[in-house]
Image (cartoon, rainbow, N blue to C red):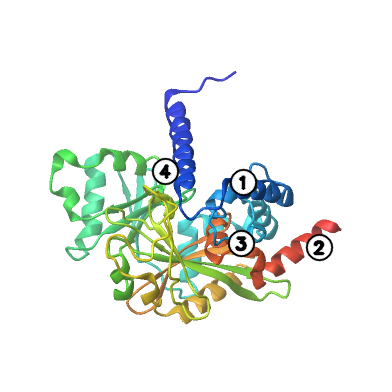
Amino acid sequence: MGKINDSQFDINTKKKKSKLKRLLQVLKDPDRKSLFRIFVEVMCVSFAKRNFPPGFYMSRYLFKKFRTNIFDFYPYSYFDRLNRFFNDDEARPVLENKLFTHFFYSRFHVQMPVLLAFNHRTKFVVGNVVHEVADKDDFRKILELLLSGLAENESVFIKKMWGSYGGEDIFRVDKNIFSDNSHFPDDLYNRVIRSDFIFQEQIKQHPVLDRLNPSCVNTVRIDTFIDKSGKAEVMSAYLRLGIKGSHVDNITAGGLAVPVDIETGRLNKFGYLGSSENWTILPEEHPDTHTKFEDITIPFFDEVKHLVCRMAALVPELRLLGWDIAIGESGPVFIEGNTFYDMSGVDLNYGGYRKNPVFKKAIEEYKGIKRK
C-alpha cells in the first residue's frame, strides 16, 4: 500500500478542519432551520437525488430558512454526468487550451485580451520571434520586453495554457517586479519553464465594475445550452468579484458571487461569500468598497448575451458551456470558456436549476436518451 507523504497529510488535515469550521458556522447561524428539520431534509434529498451524504445541502445554503425549494438543486455528480453527455471530448481542446481558444475566436473577431507571448517550456514566442530561455536572466529579459510596451500602471497576466481551474496558475506581473533584484520571483520562473503559459495584456475594466471592486478584473459567469435544433440559449448568469489583495475573482480564492437578472443585467440584493470568517452571512455590499449590489446594473449586458450565444454556436459539439466575460470600457471581453466546469455556482446563484426553463430542455433530452 502506498504511503501518504507529509504534504498530502497536511492538505487532508486542512480540508477536514475547513469542513468542521463550516459546520460550526452553520450551527451558530441564527437564520438556519431547526436541527431536526435539517436532519429530515438531508435524508429526503439524499433519497431523492440518490446522493449521500448530500454535500450540496451545505454549499447551496439549503440549511437557511428561506430555502424552501430544496429539491430544485442538484448534486455535483449529476452536473458532471451532464457535462460529459453534452460535450464531445474531441472538441474540448478548443476551449480547454487557452492558446487554441485565442487563435480560434480571433478568426471570428471576438474581443479578447491582447496576446503578448506564449511559451512551451523554455521556448518563448514573442511576436514572430522564438526566444530560447536558458536561465532566470533570460526570463527577466522576456518580461522586461513585454512590460516595456505598457503604461506604468499596467500589468501582464501569465496564465497556464491548459489544466488550470479556480484561479490557479494565474500570475500578475508589473514593473515593480524589477525593483528589488533579490526578490525576483524564482518560483514564477520555475513554474513557467516547466509548462506552457500565455502572456496577456491587462484589461481596462469598465468604471461601473471598478466601483464594486477595482483590485482585479471581475467577470460575468454566464452559461449556455445548445438544444436539439441547434439554437444556443443563455441559461443564467452571476457576477464573480475579487477582494482586496487578490488578482483573480474566483469564489474559491476568497471572492464573492452575486446573481444577475438575466433580462436586465441588474445585480441581486445579496450575494455569496467564498472563503470567509463566516461564509453563512449573505452580503449586500462589497466588503472593501461597500458598494451595494442592487445599485449596480452590468453595462453592455445585452451584448454579453449575444456574444456568448454567438461563440457557443461556433462550437456545436460543445453544447453545455460556462463563459467568463469581462466588461471593458467599450464592451464585453471574452476571457475563457469552460467545458467541464463546476455548475454548482450557477445552481446556487439561480436558486435551484431544476426550475430553469432552458436547463429543463437539457434534462429532458438527457433523460430521454437514457431511457432508450
Q: Amino acid at mark 1?
A: Phe
Describe the element under mark 2 as helix, strand or loop.
helix
As helix, strand or loop, the secondary structure at mark 1 comes to helix
> Dividing the picture into quarters, in which one does residue 88 lie?
bottom right
**First in sequence: mark 2 or mark 1?**
1
Per the image, the residue denoted by label 1 is: 36
Amino acid type of the residue that numbered disc 3 sits on in the rendered structure = Thr
The answer to whether residue 317 is left or right of residue 64 is right
Type of amino acid at the residue the image marks with label 4? Ser
Quadrant position of the N terminus in the picture: top right
Front of the two marks 3 and 2: 3
Q: Residue at x 13, y 48 (%)?
A: 179
**Image location (x, y in percent) of residue 86:** 68, 60
Q: Secondary structure at mark 4?
A: loop
**Residue under label 4:** 195
Q: Reading the chain from its start, which is encountered first: label 1 or label 3?
A: 1
Q: Residues within 10 Å of mark 4 (few under 14, many from 20)?
A: some
User: Up-down: is 198 above or below 359?
Assistant: above
Sequence-wise, which precedes: disc 4 or disc 2? Answer: 4
Q: CA distance from mark 3 to mark 2?
A: 28 Å
Provide the residue designation for mark 3: 68
Where residue 119 sits: x, y (%)? Answer: 38, 50
Cβ–Cβ under 8 Å for marks 2 and 1: no
| Residue under label 2 | 368
